[in-house]
Image (tube, rainbow, N blue to C red):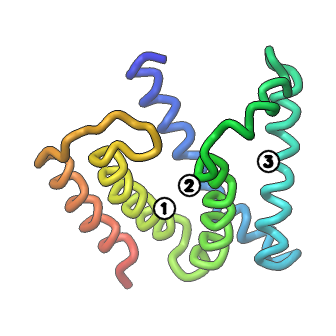
Amino acid sequence: MSRTLAVFAGAIAGVLVGMQPAINARLGRSVGTLQAASISFLVGTVFLLLITAFTSGGFVSFGHVGRVPWWALTGGLLGAVYVAISLVAVRALGASGIAAVVITGQLAISIVVDRLGLFGLTRQPIHSHRIVGLVLLVAGAALVVRK
C-alpha cells in the first residue's frame, strides 16, 4: 500500500472509530454498558468471519495460531477494553472528548513502541517533531475536554 493510500485509509478508519463510542453508547442505553460492548464485538466478529471465509486462504491460517507469541493474541482483548471504556467515558466527554484523549494516548504509546521496536516493529528514533506533535496533541485534547 502506498503512503498516500495508507494515510487516506487511516483517516477513514479514524472516522469510523470516531463514531463508534457514540453508537455503542446508544446501544448501551438499551441493553446495558457491558452488554453493548459484547454485542458490538459479536457483530464485528461475525463480519470478520464472513470476510475471512470469502477471501483467499479462508480459515486455513488459523492453524498457525499456536506459532505466535502469546502477546500477539491480545489485540482483541485490548480492543474490548477500549470499547468498554469508551462506552462509559463518552457520556462524560462526548464523542469529540473521547476521541481526543484516545488519540493522545494512542500517539504517546505509539512513539514508545516505535522507539523500542516493540512487537516486531522496526525501531524508529524519537525526533523533536514527534515530541512537538505529541505536545500539541495533548494541548488540543485538553482544550477539547475542558469545561
Q: Residue at x 75, y 31 (%)?
A: 64
Q: Position of residue 23 (x, y in %)?
A: 71, 61
Question: In this image, 122 relative to 1: left or right?
Answer: left
**Does dot 3 land on a helix, a strand or a loop?**
helix
Question: In this image, 36 relative to 133: left or right?
Answer: right
Q: Look at discs 3 and 2 and give the one toward the viewer.
A: 3
Q: Residue at x 63, y 51 (%)?
A: 70
Q: Cα distance, mark 3 to mark 2?
A: 16 Å
**Is label 3 in contact with label 2 (beta carbons under 8 Å)?**
no
Dot 3 or dot 2, earlier in sequence: 2
Residue under circle 3? 44
| Image quadrant where one finds the C terminus | bottom left
Q: Residues within 10 Å of mark 2 (few under 14, many from 20)?
A: some
**Is label 2 in contact with label 1 (beta carbons under 8 Å)?**
yes
Q: Residue at x 48, y 38 (%)?
A: 11
Q: Position of residue 33 (x, y in %)?
A: 77, 77
Dot 3 or dot 1, earlier in sequence: 3
Q: Residue at x 73, y 65 (%)?
A: 24
Q: Position of residue 97 (x, y in %)?
A: 46, 70
In the rendered view, tell whether residue 77 sits above or below residue 97.
Answer: above
Label 3 is placed on what type of residue?
Answer: Gly
Nearest to the observer: residue 61 or residue 96: 61
Question: In this image, 75 relative to 146: left or right?
Answer: right
Q: Cα distance, mark 3 to mark 1?
A: 20 Å
In the rendered view, tell whether residue 16 sits above or below residue 10.
Answer: below
